[in-house]
Amino acid sequence: MPNDWTPTSWQTKPATQQPLYPDLRELNATVERLSRLPPLVTSWEVDALKRHLAAAAAGRQFVLQGGDCAESFADCESSSIANKLKILLQMSLVLVHGLKKPVVRIGRIAGQYAKPRSAEMETRGDKTLWSYRGDLVNESDFTEAARMPNPQLLLRGYERAALTLNFVRSLAEGGFADLHHPENWDLRFMVKSPQAEQYHRMVASIGESLRFMESLAGSRVGEINRVDFFTSHEGLHLTYEQAQTRQVPRRPGWYNLSTHLPWIGDRTRHLEGAHVEYFRGIVNPIGVKVGNSIAPEELTTLIDILHPTDEPGRLTLIHRFGARKIAQSLPPLINAVRRTGKTVLWVCDPMHGNTESTSDGIKTRDFANIRSELEHAFDIHQSLGSILGGVHFELTGEDVTECIGGSSGVETSDLPRAYKTLVDPRLNYEQALEMAMLIANHSVKINAK
Ligand code: PEP
Ligand code: CO
């Protein structure tokens, strides 16, 4: 741990994207309460994830990170959580099968409650109110009371995260996750999916191999009835993160025990800012989103600060440029990282550079652009001798219509039918599964070259 760092040293730096609470006494009392509540994850799990990420950086494993743009408190219910887990398990099975390497599953889940916004205030008609900053901060209804930042929501967020995690853990440990019964992961609306047949063929062939192995060995293949599942969220609300930053017996350093993998967003990664200050001192593996606006020298300075000892698995760079810009923006960053002599894990987020608005002003993303950015990412890393070790998606296990395209053919005119996201458009269940299949096929193709 750097000796000039404390969990509160970020408070001496400029902190962007933080809500202004009307009552600081209430905020402090809430933080005090939050700091005494038990941690959501353990240091063992955090350290285990770091080892997996180190393996992914070396190309021995592959990261699948995904979930909502913004989780909502209202969606903290069994079907929504189980469906998210189902789609991530299905995608990971497709990836394991295609890539022939272990997949590290990380949800944007159990804490993805705070959102950066481009404007502090929102105006409708003659009324101007605080922007909605996620359920951790305020409510999305356009009324003065709903939009007022409320410290009690920090506690409600912690509780929702704990409830979510409790259910995810039971599902991941129990019969639900057993590879002998992948039918548990089928989604209700899957029957009409063009992807279903290919997926079921693959599952049947995995089942056959499994039974073959087990008859050969005369016993059940170990560890196949449970899965590892990790959590992540953008570490945006520094007061929330600070309150859950703890020391643990017999391990040095400070852990953020609200999640396994916190990341810094593209809007808050200022070298002199509070987010970088907070993140440099915690021992978790950390992510940083990097977009078109980061200069190569800025990235190398960021690596000096956040990744000084080149510890394996410590730093994940999640790049998000957009299909049209990746060819220009990514190579200089890969070269800059190479000049540092350090190892990072590269992950591609093909969502955030591909957001567009329809003529009706609906925010959407086109499946073709998402796919194109991903394919470019694989090709560029390979041509520069670098490794793309994972992918990052905004997705849901529900049958929503938020992104257009894919073989199920969501069109612009379908968007209003089931447009539910509070912030960014997510791949629906079919689009997500199709994307996993395309990744598996594309990387088989480039590896055969
Ligand atoms: C996000 O992941 O929801 C997000 C806001 O991304 P970025 O920081 O890359 O813009
Ligand atoms: Co988003």
Image (cartoon, rainbow, N blue to C red):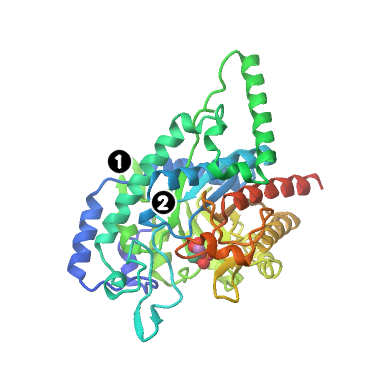
- In percent of width and height, residue 207 lies at 63, 27
* 380 displayed left or right of 75: right
- In percent of width and height, residue 325 lies at 67, 70
- In percent of width and height, residue 15 lies at 37, 72
For mark 1, what is the residue? 249
Q: Residue at x 56, y 19 (%)?
A: 220
- In percent of width and height, residue 399 lies at 54, 52
Visible residue check, residue 174: yes
Q: Residue at x 40, y 65 (%)?
A: 277
Outermost residue toward the bottom in this view:
126
Q: In which quadrant will I find the N terminus?
A: bottom left
* 89 displayed left or right of 134: right
Give the Cα separation between the discs numbered 1 and 2.
14 Å
User: Height in image: 354 above or below 49?
Assistant: below
SS assignment at label 1: loop
For mark 2, what is the residue? 283
User: Height in image: 367 above or below 222?
Assistant: below
Circle 1/circle 2 CB separation < 8 Å = no
Number of other residues with Cα within 10 Å of mark 2, as a class: few under 14, some 14 to 19, many 20 or more: some
Which one is nearer the viewer's eye here, 289 or 153?
A: 153
Which one is nearer the viewer's eye here, 298 or 108?
A: 108
Which one is nearer the viewer's eye here, 412 or 344?
A: 412
Q: What amino acid type is highlighted by mark number 2?
A: Val
Q: What amino acid type is highlighted by mark number 1?
A: Pro
* 187 displayed left or right of 158: right
Q: Residue at x 62, y 53 (%)?
A: 431
